[in-house]
Image: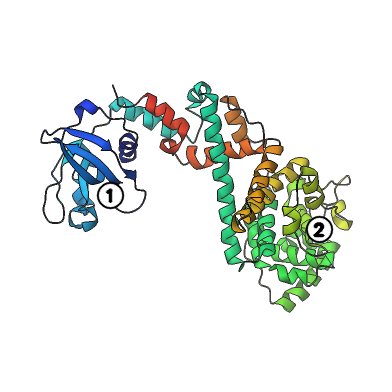
Amino acid sequence: MERLMHYVWKHRLWHPEKMLTVDGRSVRIIDPGQHNMNAGPDFFNAKISIDGHLWAGDVEIHVRASDWHRHHHDNDRAYDSVILHVVDYDDTFITRSNGEVIPQMRMPCNPEFHQHFTNLVNRADLDLPCCDTIAAMPPLYLTDWLASLAYERIYDKSDRILELLKRMSGDWESTCYVTLARALGFGVNGQPFELLALSLPLRFIGKHSDSLTSIEALLFGQSGLLDEPSAQTDSYAASLKREYDFLAHKFGLRKPQALGWKMSRMRPANFPHRRIAIFAAMLHGGFRMVNRMLDIASREDADALLNPPLSGYWTTHFTFGREAPTRTFVMSKSSIDGLIINVVAPLMFAYGQSHDRPELSDKAIDLLQALPAEHNSIVDLFKRAGIKVADAFASQAVIQLRRNYCQQKKCLYCRIGHRRLAARSSRQ
C-alpha cells in the first residue's frame, strides 16, 4: 500500500481540490520532490505551499500516521527536515525530535484504484494482465521503453563482467574464461560451470594448453563427472582420471563439492559432458579470446571462434559410457547466437566502457540487432501480447522486462504498468 502511495505522490495522481492538512489548511504541491530509494525521508527537496506559505524540505509517506512513531522517526534528526507527513489513516499527530508538530495531510487511495493495482501485481508473475494496455500503446512509446530495457540488460551484464574483472585482479582473459564457462551452461547449468571455472585457474590450463587430454582431464576431474557410475566402466574416462589425479597433485587442486549438474529433461547435445568437451576444445592451443572477441563483426566470425570442431571420443559420445548411434554435431546456430548474446556482446560492451572506447559498446549493440530474436516462452508471451520482437536486442528487452519487472512485481516502475495505472488513477 505504501508503495502505491509513493507512486500516486510521485506522479501527481492526487485530487488537487482535496489537498488539505488534517487541521483544515489548504495545501498546494509545487514540486513533489525527488524519490529517495535509500534511508531517510521518502522524497527530498519538495516545495509545498500551506495556506499560502512556502515550505521547502522533505516529505514522508506512511499508511498510518502512527507508523512515524513505530519507525522511531520522532527521535531521528534525519527526519527533522520533513515539512509534510502524507498518510492514508490519520490516527495520531507527529513531531520532530524537538517536539515541534509537523503538518499532516490525508491522501487516501481510491479503493477501486488500490484493487486494480493489487490485481495487476498479484498476476504479474503468472501471465500478462497488462496485455490489453500493450496492444493499445503508441508504437513510439513502446519502442522507447523496449530500447531502455535492452540497454538496462546489457549494462547489468557488463556490470557483472566488470565485478568479475576486479575479482580476477584486472585479468581480462581470466574474466572471459569464467564468463564463457557460465554461458556454456546455457542457464540451467550456468552456476555449476562458473564454479568449475573458478575452481580451476586459467594459468594451470595454460601450462598444458598443447594437450587436449590434459585439459579435458582437468575440467572433467574438477567437475566431478569422472566420479559418476557411467565413468567407472569407461576406458577413456579412466585415462582422464589417471591424468587428473597427477595434475591435481601437481597444482594442489581441490575439487568443488556437489556442483549440482542437471541433466533431466535435457537433450543429449546439451549435457554438461558435451559442453565441457567443447570448452576444452576452445582452451586447446592457448586461451587468447578477448582480442578475438573484440574483432568479431558478424555471426560468421563468432561461429568460427565459438564452434570448435570436436575430435576423438567426443565425436561419437554425449556422455561417458554409451556411444551415440550417429556421429554427433557440435553446437547449433541458436547455441552460437546464445554465446554472442551472453558473452561476446556483454564483454565487448564492458571493455568499451572500461577503456573509454564507445565504438566497441556501439558495436556490441549492432551485433545484437543483427541477430534473430531468441526463441523461448518469455518472447512468445510478449509476442502474443502484440509486441514485435524482431531481433536479439528486442528479445533481450522483453526478457529484462519479464524477469526484472513482471516477476519482481515492479509494475509501478514499468512504463506499461504506469500507463495502465495512470489511466485508472485516484483522480475521479
Q: Which mark is residue 194?
A: none
Image position, residue 358 (x, y; %): 62, 50
Residue neighbourhood size for the residue with mark 1, other residues' Cα within 10 Å, grouped as few (<14), some (14–19), many (≥20): many
Front-most of residues 34 and 94: 34
Residue neighbourhood size for the residue with mark 2, other residues' Cα within 10 Å, grouped as few (<14), some (14–19), many (≥20): many
SS label for mark 1: loop
Please, is residue 205 above or below residue 114 in the view?
Answer: below
Tell me which amino acid carries mark 2: Ala
Question: What residue is rendered at 57% in x and 24% in y?
Answer: 386
Q: Is residue 250 left or right of residue 112?
A: right
SS label for mark 2: helix
Q: Is residue 62 visible?
A: no
> Dot 1 corresponds to which residue?
41
Image position, residue 270 (x, y; %): 74, 47
Image position, residue 224 (x, y; %): 70, 63
Instruction: Indicate which disc, 2 or 1, sits on the residue closer to the N terminus.
Output: 1
Q: Is residue 353 visible?
A: yes
Q: Is residue 362 left or right of residue 140?
A: right
Please, is residue 77 above or below residue 153 in the view?
Answer: below
Question: What residue is rendered at 30% in x and 27% in y?
Answer: 426
Question: What residue is rendered at 22% in x and 53% in y?
Answer: 79
Report if the CB atoms under discs 2 and 1 are less than 8 Å apart.
no
Front-most of residues 337 and 149: 149
Tell me which amino acid carries mark 1: Pro
Image position, residue 187 (x, y; %): 64, 48
**Which quarter of the figure has residue 382?**
top right
Front-most of residues 267 and 413: 413
Q: Which mark is residue 281?
A: 2
Nearer mark to the viewer, of 2 and 1: 1
Q: Is residue 204 left or right of residue 148?
A: right
